Amino acid sequence: MQLKGRLQALEITRRVRPADRTRPPGRGPQYGCTTLCAMPPGKPNNRRLADMSAAGEPDQPWAPELPTVRTYLYTFLISATARYTQRLDCDEWDRLVEWAVIQSRLIDGRWQRVAVYDICHRKGAHIHLYDREEREFTQVSLKPVTCRRDVEEALDEALDRVIEHSAENEWRSDRGK
């Protein structure tokens, strides 16, 4: 797109509304606006501005825009004496906010935690390992989480790891190391 003549200011506004979602009762439709303003080069207002195009954003821990309003729990058996539970915390739009994958094993008729993979407390994806008395003995970082896509990728990785490393996690739990 080519603009002719002197450009004093250009304003582009785009209205965004998520598809297939309904707002909670008492709240009307909400639109987000993006506004861009461009001034012609050489004007006094532009001369002293720093060039921000080269500066990247620092890696900040991901924080959801909206708080958790729903929690979903799903339990799956790994074997006759091992299982994992998925806890998915979602916002009012049913978008994933936080999650945890809890590996448990059956000892003396009681399910005990062995490992918890999660992204809670703004630390990125990590794993908590527990001993036979369910005391946490270590925490290991898995990957940083800085955006919503990272949240979903880390969940997929945690689900793979809980299956692949379930025997190793149980062995470490027995030893407490």
Image (cartoon, rainbow, N blue to C red):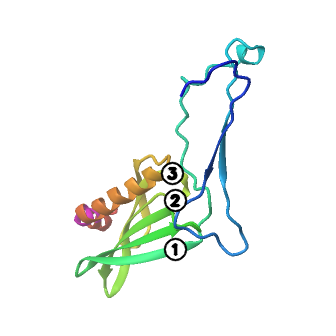
The prevailing secondary structure element of the residues shown in magenta is helix
Say which amino acid is labelled 1.
Thr
Where does the C terminus fall, quadrant-wise?
bottom left
- SS category of the residue bearing label 2: helix
Query: Which residue shows up at 70% across the image and 11% down it?
Result: 42
Image position, residue 36 (x, y; %): 66, 34
Is 38 situated above or below 130? above
166 within the magenta span: yes
The one of 26 and 117 positioned closer to us in this rendering: 26
Say which amino acid is labelled 2.
Cys
Of badges 1 and 2, the one in the foreground is 1
Q: In the rendered image, which quarter is residue 57 located in?
A: top right
Cβ atoms at labels 2 and 3 below 8 Å apart: yes
Is 41 situated above or below 22? above
Which mark is first along the chain, 1 or 3?
1
Residue 129 makes an appearance in the image = yes
Residue bearing the label numbered 3: 123
